[in-house]
Image: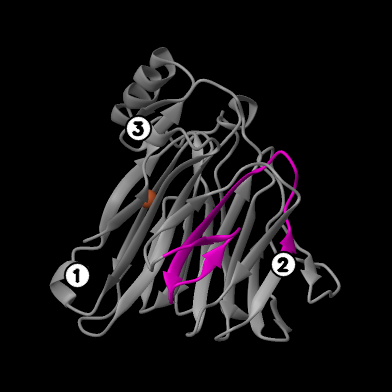
Amino acid sequence: MRLTRVISPEQGLDPFLLLDEFDSSSAGDYIAGFPSHPHRGFETVTYMLDGHMLHEDHLGNRGDLTPGAVQWMTAGRGIIHSEMPRQAAGRMRGFQLWINLAAKEKMQAARYRDLVPAEIPEVALEGSRVRVVAGGFEPLAPRAAAVKGPVGDGTTAPLYLDANLDAGATLTIATPPGHRVLAYAFEGAPTVAGRALAKGQLAILGDGSSLVLSAGATAARVLVIGGKPLGERVVHYGPFVMNSEAEIRQAISDYQSGKLTAAA
Ligand code: FE
């Protein structure tokens, strides 16, 4: 699958490990999909914007990822899954985010949440529409009631918003102090916290309690992600993210002996 890596593990954007964007209308770029592979120690969040993928895992979960759907997968001690395209033509577009788990959560049982588009609240404000995947969305200007997304648990207390801004619109949102907050411009050329971004640019924000997003002369769309940094050692090896080399060796050995997904 052809991907654009927006965030890589080497950047140390604790608790975020990776953000990939995929966007292609040529089947050759996505038809191979992601055949069966393992994960341990973190969460993967897939957000589909266009296209159709089928997810299946060793727990028997099966989910259709259609436009606007989210798959929130907490690998915990181990999951083996696949994500394969269910289309042979047309546009495939979306994101995959990896969020680290705290040491005490890495060996929990795997958990899978398939969120269909209707389960994700969309808040309509003057000049903007915001889909709330995770955490609490609190609009400060225009001011409106806070809305909680369907995901909100875990040490990292993730925030995941898809903000659609009309041309000329400005939106100020509350952000949790102490969280790492990132904003990725994926349509248009928005201004984020006073800095003009081009499409495909990521803003790494300083600590604060609010964030101002503005569209320019054209409409813009911004992915806003936030999470509480864990401040723990990160050892990443392929599909495993643990706190020590010994735990990585254990993950590889568990996978090879078929114990990755065995009950604790
Ligand atoms: Fe995966």
Q: Which residue is mark 3?
A: 258
Which sits in the foreground, 256 or 51? 51
Disc 2 crowd rating (10 Å Cα; few below 14, some 14-19, many 20+) is some
- Residue 31 position by quadrant: bottom left
Q: Residue at x 51, y 33 (%)?
A: 77
Instruction: Pinpoint residue 171: horizontal percent, then vertical percent.
Output: 68, 72
Residue bearing mark 2: 172
* Mark 3 vs ligand 1: CB below 8 Å: no
Pointer 1 and pointer 2: residues touching (CB < 8 Å)? Answer: no
Q: Nearer the viewer, mark 3 or mark 2?
A: 2
Question: Residues at badges 3 and 1 in contact (C-beta under 8 Å)?
Answer: no
Within 10 Å of the Cα at label 3, are there few (<14), some (14-19), or many (20+) other Cα atoms? few
Q: Can you give x and y, in whole percent of width and height, for residue 201 in the image?
A: 40, 59
In the image, is residue 169 above or below residue 198?
below
Q: Which residues are magenta?
A: 173-197
Q: Are marks 3 and 2 in contact (CB under 8 Å)?
A: no
Which residue sits furthest left? 28
Placement of the C terminus among the 4 image quadrants: top right
Frontmost residue, 19 versus 126: 126
